[in-house]
């Protein structure tokens, strides 16, 4: 049997896709802001999961209408990339995508050329991001970190205090992990760790595909400056790991692509729990890493061969966490080094599994946002920083080719701010007018439903997240604008 192909063109395509974008926005907009509500996901086993994150919600969403589902797929693709990059800001980006597409559609329906709208949007985005960059607030340390973490933790002073204490102990460049506790008590725990500036050799090594992170327990570690050309070169080591049921971290100067593929297949089939990273080029550092984990640096300069090496050369750590940029080795059994650092673990407790997971999500969001602000600075939060920055731009002073795009962008950013205020159960339009009249750093405080000095309260959003969200939203809206035809499989004939 063969499937018949169906075709849609022009206005009909964009209306269907727009409906899909609206469905994505409707599914997540109630989760936006401190007064947000979560979405419960039913699970086949265990209690339902409470979810607030925009990407996690739409990743589970599927529409019955295939034309509308195509629009939803555009959002999933863009927001999935954003989530893997910063793990935050996806809800506001999803709402922005729909608002940008809706405003763009008005121009297209009136006969404006799609390419003109797309180029104008791109130019407007670039100008907006430059203005936004000028408003960035730098945060160094101190109690301000606690206020920021409290705000990012949906107003929870409990979250803010723990993150403040953790940063105070390990520093703003230090490593902080969020884990689940076996009791209902949340507490801090400090362990020794070693950080390597090298990440996943392949995303398929990740144990958590959504976050793009590999987390291994009871890990044996191979450190070598040699190229692993084939699995046979480390066969003895792989066999010993298979027998011991431990995990394996490979740190090698190079691993052939076919060997990587074989290792991934073994991992995915459940044979081995392993991960690989590219070794730093500094051989002294590799020697230090081997010492720290109680292993042997398998080096050609020492006359050592991978083929002749067995499990005796492997180091050990209780836990290894690898993302796309760095590797963290925690509680190794080797000798401590100056390059070792204290790792803080915030162990999240809860009376029920549902409560613990919801609290963990709150901590994760607050920690990621706080660290992003410490790294690249922040903007006045609650959607107000975006609103003020774009309100400073006068379309009358812009080149003609930017006017359409800036008009669209202004309406979308205002719509985002209206959504946040509306989620606080107050009439949004009068509030925004009062806020704009008062000026920065004042804005709408969703927690108290009043107009306050947001900066003094620590209500700050990460600039990195805001700028990425705008970039992904404009890019996705641009794809919508240029969509002129759709080919569908309509059924069997």
Image (tube, rainbow, N blue to C red):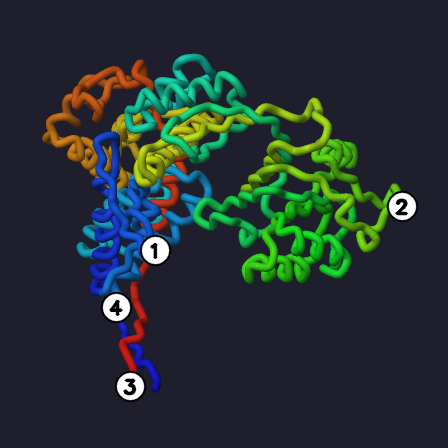
Residue under circle 4?
9
Is 79 situated above or below 390?
A: below
Residue under circle 2?
303
Q: Quadrant of residue 53?
A: top left
Which label sits in the foreground, 2 or 4? 2
N-terminal of the pair, mark 1 or mark 3, is 1
Residue under circle 3?
493
Q: Quadrant of residue 269?
A: bottom right
Is 286 situated above or below 452?
A: below
How far across and how far down the image is residue 57, in percent?
30, 48
Q: Residue at x 29, y 28 (%)?
A: 154
Q: Secondary structure at mark 3?
A: loop
User: How far apart are the two marked residues, 1 and 2, measured between alpha carbons?
Assistant: 54 Å
Is 413 situated above or below 22?
A: above
Residue toward you, 203 or 358 = 358
N-terminal of the pair, mark 2 or mark 4, is 4
Q: Residue at x 55, y 59 (%)?
A: 270
Q: Residue at x 28, y 49 (%)?
A: 41
N-terminal of the pair, mark 4 or mark 3, is 4
Assess whether mark 2 and mark 3 are in contact (beta carbons under 8 angstroms). Answer: no
Residue under circle 1?
74
User: How far apart are the two marked residues, 1 and 3, measured between alpha carbons?
Assistant: 29 Å
């Amino acid at each position: 049997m063969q499937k018949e192909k169906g075709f849609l063109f022009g206005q009909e395509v964009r209306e269907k896709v727009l409906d899909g974008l609206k469905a994505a926005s409707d599914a997540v907009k109630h989760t936006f802001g401190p007064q947000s509500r979560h979405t419960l996901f039913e699970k086949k086993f265990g209690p339902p999961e409470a979810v607030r994150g925009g990407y996690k919600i739409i990743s589970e969403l599927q529409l019955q209408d295939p034309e509308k589902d195509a629009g939803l797929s555009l959002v999933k693709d863009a927001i999935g990339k954003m989530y893997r990059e910063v793990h935050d800001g996806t809800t506001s980006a999803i709402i922005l995508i729909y608002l940008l597409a809706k405003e763009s559609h008005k121009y297209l329906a009136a006969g404006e050329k799609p390419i003109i709208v797309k180029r104008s949007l791109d130019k407007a985005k670039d100008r907006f991001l430059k203005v936004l960059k000028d408003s960035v607030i730098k945060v160094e340390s101190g109690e301000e970190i606690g206020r920021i973490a409290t705000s990012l933790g949906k107003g929870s002073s409990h979250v803010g205090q723990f993150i403040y204490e953790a940063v105070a102990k390990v520093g703003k460049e230090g490593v902080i992990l969020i884990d689940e506790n076996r009791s209902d008590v949340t507490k801090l725990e400090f362990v020794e760790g070693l950080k390597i500036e090298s990440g996943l050799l392949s995303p398929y090594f990740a144990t958590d595909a959504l976050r793009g992170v590999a987390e291994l327990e009871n890990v044996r570690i191979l450190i070598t400056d040699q190229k692993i050309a084939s699995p046979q070169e480390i066969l003895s080591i792989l066999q010993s790991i298979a027998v011991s049921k431990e995990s394996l971290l490979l740190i090698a100067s190079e691993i052939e692509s076919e060997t990587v593929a074989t290792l991934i297949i073994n991992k995915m089939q459940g044979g081995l729990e392993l991960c690989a990273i590219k070794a730093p080029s500094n051989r002294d550092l590799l020697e230090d890493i081997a010492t720290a984990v109680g292993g042997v640096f398998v080096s050609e300069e020492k006359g050592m061969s991978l083929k002749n090496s067995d499990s005796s050369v492997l180091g050990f750590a209780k836990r290894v966490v690898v993302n796309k940029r760095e590797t963290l080795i925690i509680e190794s059994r080797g000798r401590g080094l100056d390059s070792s650092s204290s790792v803080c673990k915030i162990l999240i407790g809860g009376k029920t599994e549902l409560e613990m997971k919801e609290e963990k999500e709150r901590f994760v969001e607050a920690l990621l946002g706080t660290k992003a602000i410490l790294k690249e600075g922040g903007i006045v939060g609650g959607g107000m920083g975006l609103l003020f920055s774009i309100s400073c731009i006068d379309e009358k002073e812009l080149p003609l080719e930017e006017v359409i795009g800036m008009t669209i962008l202004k309406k979308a950013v205002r719509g985002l701010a209206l959504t946040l205020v509306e989620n606080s159960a107050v009439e949004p339009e009068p509030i925004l007018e009062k806020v704009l009249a008062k000026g920065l750093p004042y804005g709408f405080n969703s927690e108290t439903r009043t107009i306050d000095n947001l900066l003094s309260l620590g209500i700050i959003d990460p600039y990195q997240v805001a700028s990425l969200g705008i970039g992904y939203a404009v890019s996705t809206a641009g794809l919508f604008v240029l969509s002129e035809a759709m080919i569908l499989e309509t059924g069997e004939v």
